[in-house]
Image (tube, rainbow, N blue to C red):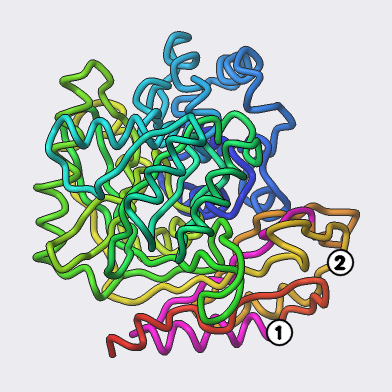
């Protein structure tokens, strides 16, 4: 079968890498792709938001399945447009994608259906937001309601910091995404990412991972899209995973079906493991980045039939196998990321780094100029490694990182510290 992946980041390279191993695959395309994806798939220069052109390409190339990587095209309705054209899509409708497209929508859904999450308020008026912050004190969490590329959340340590964040967001920092806010109680605990495939009625658990959001070591600096990840997450025990499925994921799937927005795709739950049990911080409606990079390294089953089962409503008769090994990903980002990443520097010696045993390097913001590999984004490379435990996977990943010749890049040197602390 012919498959089209939408997107251009490390997440999409990881998905293409996994799908390319399927014996069911005839041809793999990616739109628009990157320099690394081009080694696995035919890259197509079509704007993902030009829905009509995407649909025409699918029909011309006899595409059997479209896998949508990023959230923005889903929220804008790409999956709806393709389904209306008779094309099978792994990804939710625009209505179901509101779980990520509007944090307020997600919180209201949780409130209506008794799904455990932090107490909250919704605001589009600065004076009311400031009064709410003053009444509840700090620490407190300020979130832009809409899509803000993973950067629209401020965990404020003081009332002044919280009110400044509210002023900045409502003042236009994130454009329309910040036109309204969700302000919620601060939850204390350990944060984990949990993933499940969903076919509208049934949910199949995948695995957990832990991300590193801050730009610099010691969880310092600005929030980013993610500077590294590892899987499994030792803090999410099998018992807690069952609780997450029974109290959070399955009730959400049932709620979406009941409210006329059945969810099809991957449901990514950002969780806080509190003293009162797991609570939902947020939903994303696509694979995480860089979490997808470590999940695909651990997956031992064919991903393609799993996606088809989700599209066709047959996940209740499906299962997946996972490696017991740890997978760890270190993100190499361009200097200046996340505010003003520098583009155009050359990256060398990648082949030698990728030759290390159990290392796979996924591209994100890269392009080719002849034989030269050029940095062309904020997060540029994802160096992944597997090992018997987190220590071995981490050692391999950083050995590869140290072989990459790229003075224009930087990375965190402490990826996986929580897993090492668990022993």
Residue 347 drawn above or below residue 358: above
Asked whether the beta carbons under mark 1 and mark 2 sit within 8 Å of each other, the answer is no
Query: Which of the image's four quarters has the N terminus?
Result: top left
Q: Is residue 383 magenta?
A: yes
Disc 2, SS = strand
Residue 377 drawn above or below residue 98: below
**Pointer 2: what residue?**
346
Residue at 70 percent across and 33 percent down: it is: 44
Q: Is residue 235 magenta?
A: no
Residue 164 - label: none
**Left or right: 170 as drawn, with respect to 127:** right
Residue at 64 percent across and 44 percent down: it is: 8
Residue at 34 percent across and 26 percent down: it is: 96
Q: Position of residue 306 (x, y in %)?
A: 30, 42
Residue 403 - label: 1
Query: Which of the image's four quarters has the C terminus?
Result: bottom left
Q: In the rendered structure, which segment of residues is drawn in magenta? A: 376-403
Front position in the image: 327 or 420:
420
- Residue sitting farthest toward the right: 370
Query: Cα distance, mark 1 to mark 2?
Result: 14 Å
**Left or right: 287 as drawn, with respect to 281:** right
Q: Earlier in the sequence, mark 1 or mark 2?
A: 2
């Amino acid at each position: 079968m012919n498959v089209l992946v939408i997107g251009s980041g490390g997440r999409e390279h990881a998905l293409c890498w996994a799908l390319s191993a399927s014996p069911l695959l005839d041809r793999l395309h990616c739109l628009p792709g990157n320099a690394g994806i081009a080694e696995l798939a035919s890259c197509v220069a079509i704007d993902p938001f030009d829905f009509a052109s995407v649909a025409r390409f699918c029909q011309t190339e006899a595409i059997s399945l479209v896998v949508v990587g990023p959230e923005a095209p889903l929220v804008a309705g790409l999956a709806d447009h393709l389904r209306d054209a008779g094309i099978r899509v792994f990804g939710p409708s625009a209505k179901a994608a509101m779980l990520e497209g509007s944090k307020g929508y997600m919180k209201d859904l949780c409130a209506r259906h008794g799904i455990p999450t932090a107490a909250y308020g919704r605001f589009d008026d600065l004076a009311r937001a400031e009064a709410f912050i003053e009444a509840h004190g700090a620490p407190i969490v300020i979130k832009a309601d809409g899509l803000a590329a993973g950067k629209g959340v401020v965990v404020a340590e003081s009332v002044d910091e919280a009110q400044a964040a509210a002023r900045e967001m409502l003042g236009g920092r994130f454009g329309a995404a910040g036109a309204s806010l969700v302000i919620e109680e601060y939850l204390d605990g350990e944060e984990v990412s949990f993933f499940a495939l969903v076919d509208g009625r049934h949910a199949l658990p995948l695995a957990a991972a832990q991300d590193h959001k801050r730009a610099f070591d010691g969880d310092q600096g600005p929030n980013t899209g993610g500077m590294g990840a590892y899987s499994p997450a030792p803090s999410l025990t099998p018992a807690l995973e069952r609780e997450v499925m029974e109290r959070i994921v399955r009730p959400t799937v049932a709620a979406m079906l009941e409210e006329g927005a059945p969810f099809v795709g991957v449901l990514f739950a950002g969780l806080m493991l509190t003293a009162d049990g797991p609570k939902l911080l947020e939903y994303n409606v696509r694979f995480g980045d860089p979490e997808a990079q470590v999940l695909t390294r651990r997956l031992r089953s064919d991903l393609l039939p799993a996606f088809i089962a989700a599209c066709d409503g047959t996940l209740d008769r499906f299962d997946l196998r996972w490696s017991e090994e740890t997978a760890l990903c270190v993100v190499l980002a361009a200097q200046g990321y996340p505010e003003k990443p520098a583009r155009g520097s050359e990256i060398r010696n990648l082949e030698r780094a990728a030759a290390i045993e159990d290392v796979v390097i996924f591209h994100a913001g890269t392009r080719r100029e002849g034989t030269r590999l050029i940095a062309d984004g904020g997060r540029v490379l994802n160096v992944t490694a597997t090992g018997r435990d987190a220590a071995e996977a981490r050692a391999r990943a950083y050995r590869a990182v140290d072989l990459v010749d790229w003075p224009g890049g930087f990375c965190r040197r402490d990826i996986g510290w929580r897993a090492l602390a668990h022993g």
